[in-house]
Image: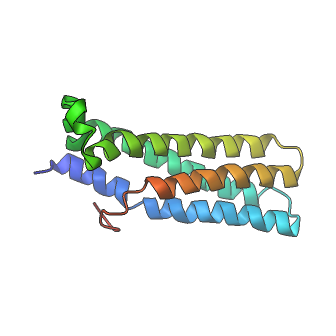
Amino acid sequence: MLSDHYSSLLAIHSIPRWLILLSGIGAVGSCFLGISRKLPFAPLGRRAGLIYVSLIDTQFLVGVLLYFDSPLVHTLWADPAVGMKQHELRFFGVEHTTIMVIALILAHIGAIRSRRAKEALKAYSAALIWYAISLALILFGIPWWRPLLGY
């Protein structure tokens, strides 16, 4: 049986994934829009990226708390040789965590590169590349076999 604390953290971590996906699509879409219409990068590109990266950061913090409270992760690290052979233990203990940390880093790289770009086209292009790769990793790292609204 799952503890109330763990169940609450899992729900808090599970539901906002939809906001992250929507904000990622919005950030990538705003980059396409900015490039195609030759718009200034601020406020459209900057705001869309800020929302995307902020939501990922918040989700990451909840995920870190969840990781250290997870019975799946505890089981994996109690006996890694056995745990690594079980898909769900390996996925949440290693794969999901690694993929999402990389996605977070790439989103931050996109935000930094776009902020440092001198021209709007370069800012949008940098953001587009890094946010799109980050979003693709997030889509790949989501446990789609779990309930879509909850845990």
Determine whether 97 is above or below 141 in the image: above
Q: Which residue is depicted at the point 69% across and 66% down?
A: 29
Q: Quadrant of the C terminus?
A: bottom left
Q: Nearer the viewer, residue 90 or 5?
A: 90
Pick the residue in front: 2 or 50.
2
Q: Position of residue 75 (x, y in %)?
A: 19, 37
Name the colouring of the figure.
Answer: rainbow
Total tally of numbered discs in the picture = 0
Q: Viewed as shown, does residue 68 lie left or right of 30?
A: left
* Picture quadrant of residue 124: bottom right
In the rendered view, tell whether residue 76 sits above or below residue 58. Answer: above
Q: Is residue 74 visible?
A: no
Q: Position of residue 122 (x, y in %)?
A: 84, 50
Query: Which residue is at the front of the view, 142 or 55?
Result: 142
Picture quadrant of residue 63: top left
Res. 54 visible in picture: yes
Q: Is residue 129 above or below residue 75?
A: below
Q: x and y percent of residue 32 in the render?
A: 76, 65
Residue at image point 83% right, 43% down: 117
At 88% from the left and 64% from the top, the residue drawn is: 38
Percent coordinates x, y for residue 44 in the rendering: 75, 61
Residue furthest to the left in view is: 1
Is 84 on the left-hand or right-hand side of 121? left
